Amino acid sequence: MSTLKKVGVLTSGGDAPGMNACIRAVTRAAIYNGLQVFGIRYGFQGLIQGDIHQLFANSVSNIIQLGGTILKSARSAEFTTPEGRQKAYEQLQKAGIQALVVIGGDGSYRGAHEFITAYPDIQVIGLPGTIDNDLGGTDATIGFDTAINTAMRAIDNIRDTADAFNRLFFVEVMGRDSGFIALHVGLSSGAEAILVPEEKTNLEALIEILDTGWKRHKTSSIIVVAEGDDAGGAFEVAAKVKQRFSHYETKVAILGHIQRGGSPTCQDRVLATRLGAAAIESLLQGKTGIALGICHHQIRETELLAAAQTRESINPSLLRLVDILSV
């Protein structure tokens, strides 16, 4: 029988739609199983400072539809030091918390791994909360589906004005190291080209695509650019293309943090809820040092550091599909 009595939950790193749904699931699954649950505000930094508050069933009422995170988030340079992690451990000991559910991305997973390496008596489960969809051990991360739908709707609106004025729009989406958002958004919005960090940008091929469209009297075009594209992002690519291809009026739109906000989609709410409840079940089974994800509709366990270090590859056939459909 598990001796677990008290569980803490925190959100760390960049916020993602669906984090609140996950907090709700962790809280109510813990209470259902007779556990006390504590929300830790401002991530690992809040843990160091002892910003810890007990959560009850009504503490998480009416939050499943909210973007952001009611527990707030922060990055903590102090937690990367042994001294910072010791302070965090002492706060957990003071509160009697025996286990942590960490909702975040690769940096959060790495921090959690370092923490349990030093303090293995604390159970830790990681849950994938990031819009970038760049963690191993899961088909999708919490927030990704909402982010791509938000960006898709924005690009749909941009296409209206692009068509009205015969404009070429370069739309930059988030993705410093990962092209998942750009790829899915570009495909779903009918972009003429998609530039991602995983593939070297070929400006000659891009200009050829635009020239082909111009010759068949295409009145507007959309190019989706991930912020981590090797050509320097949307502004740099637009400037280079304009020097060679001035047929259209060229505009740049940076979607930025609009992709992080908004009410989570059904898919993100269900994903977050399943993973939050599964985290409590794993803790009650005595598991620790793992990240949970969903692969092929089933809960999957991956060692924390492996999940942080393993980046799922984008499907090259999808990039090829963009080329086929841009003719």
Image: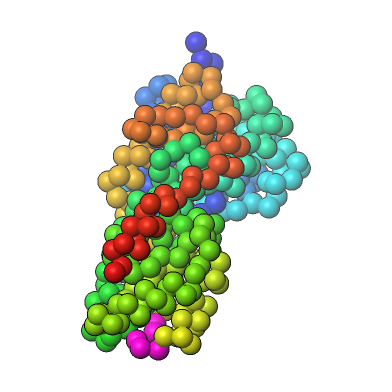
In this rendering, position of residue 235 left or right of residue 78: left
Placement of 59 over or under 282, stated as above or below: below
Q: Position of residue 34 (x, y in %)?
A: 42, 21
Q: Which residue is drawn at 51% across and 15% down?
A: 2
The foreground one among 264 and 1 is 264
Q: Where is residue 93 in the image (x, y as percent from the top left)?
A: 65, 30
Residue 150 visible? The answer is no
Placement of 324 over or under 42, stated as above or below: below
In this rendering, position of residue 320 left or right of residue 111: left
Q: Where is residue 256 in the image (x, y as percent from the top left)?
A: 45, 67
**Segment tinted magenta in the rendering:** 246-251
Quarter where residue 212 is shown:
bottom left
Q: Say whether residue 127 is magenta.
A: no
What coloring was used for the rendering?
Answer: rainbow
Q: Which residue is drawn at 63% across and 36% down?
A: 113
Q: Which residue is drawn at 62% across and 42% down?
A: 110
Q: Residue reaching furthest right?
A: 83
The foreground one among 242 and 132 is 242
The foreground one among 121 and 212 is 212
Q: Quadrant where the C terminus lies?
A: bottom left
Q: Position of residue 219 (x, y in %)?
A: 25, 82
